[in-house]
Amino acid sequence: MSISIRPLAAGDAKSLPIIHSNAVRVMAREHYSQEIIEAWTGAFTRADIESALNEPQTQWLLALDADEPAGFALRHGPEIRAVYVHPDHSRKGLGRTLLTELEQKARQEGHTSLQLEASLNARPFYQKQGYRDVTRSFFNLPDGLLMESVKMTKELS
Ligand SMILES: CC(C)(COP(=O)(O)OP(=O)(O)OC[C@H]1O[C@@H](n2cnc3c(N)ncnc32)[C@H](O)[C@@H]1OP(=O)(O)O)[C@@H](O)C(=O)NCCC(=O)NCCS
């Protein structure tokens, strides 16, 4: 097994919706309705990614498993916006490695804590990495749909 992490390049954008939609459809299906799953997968397009790639204060990472794009993560300042791992590559430590790398760079930038809004399926993953619940919340999806979530935080030591 060879896992590597590198900054996302423009040419990687096409891989992200595939990773995203598979991760959501497989890993979240027991936690949300089909309607929510479809709205969640549709809310993340290649065009969105390409326009967000060069936003200031963002850190995009791509995880490769044996040279194959297998996961990605996004941080905006002190906010973790995304960690997604394709289900074919889950539970191999890719998610943890992506998150750890985001945290290291956030520390270097002087952030003392990180915030995120976790899907219910991802909450145990974030708890394992030291994040604690702040409050229950709802994430706004297209068409006025609301997706139950948990706001979480971690102090960076
Ligand atoms: C959450 C997610 C990123 C985890 O990625 P992953 O690469 O499979 O996670 P890791 O292998 O790094 O897991 C590290 C540890 O977290 C915990 N963990 C990971 N997934 C878990 C799950 N579904 N349930 C319980 N614990 C979990 C485990 O303790 C695991 O260690 P172990 O495998 O030695 O027991 C991935 O399942 C995913 O993409 N989910 C769907 C998308 C999503 O909801 N992303 C978050 C949006 S807020």
Image: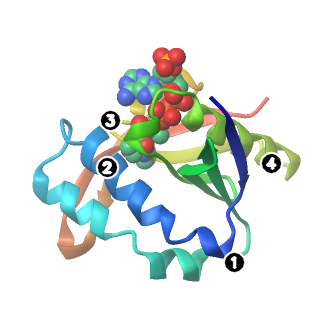
Residue 52 position by quadrant = bottom right
In the image, what residue type sits under mark 3?
Answer: Asn
Q: Are marks 2 and 4 in contact (CB under 8 Å)?
A: no
Q: Residue furthest left?
A: 34
- In front: mark 2 or mark 4? 2
Front residue of 92/117: it is 92
Q: Where does residue 4 sit, x and y in percent of width and height?
A: 70, 42
* Mark 2 within 8 Å of ligand 1, using the beta carbon: yes
In the image, what residue type sits under mark 4?
Answer: Lys
Q: Earlier in the sequence, mark 2 or mark 4?
A: 2
Q: Are marks 2 and 1 in contact (CB under 8 Å)?
A: no
Q: Earlier in the sequence, mark 2 or mark 1?
A: 2
Residue 105 badge: 4
Q: Quadrant of the N terminus?
A: top right
The residue shown at (60%, 68%) is: 12
The residue under label 3 is: 121
Q: Where does residue 39 sit, x and y in percent of width and height?
A: 22, 65
Front residue of 148/2: it is 2
Q: Are marks 4 and 1 in contact (CB under 8 Å)?
A: no
* Mark 3 within 8 Å of ligand 1, using the beta carbon: yes
Q: Is residue 36 above or below residue 94?
A: below
Query: Label 3, label 2: how many angstroms apart (C-alpha)?
Result: 9 Å
In the image, what residue type sits under mark 1?
Answer: Asn
- In front: mark 3 or mark 2? 2
Q: Is residue 72 above or below residue 112?
A: below
In the image, what residue type sits under mark 2?
Answer: Val
Ligand 1 positioned in quadrant: top left
Q: Earlier in the sequence, mark 4 or mark 1?
A: 1
The residue under label 2 is: 24
Q: Where does residue 58 sit, x and y in percent of width and height?
A: 69, 65
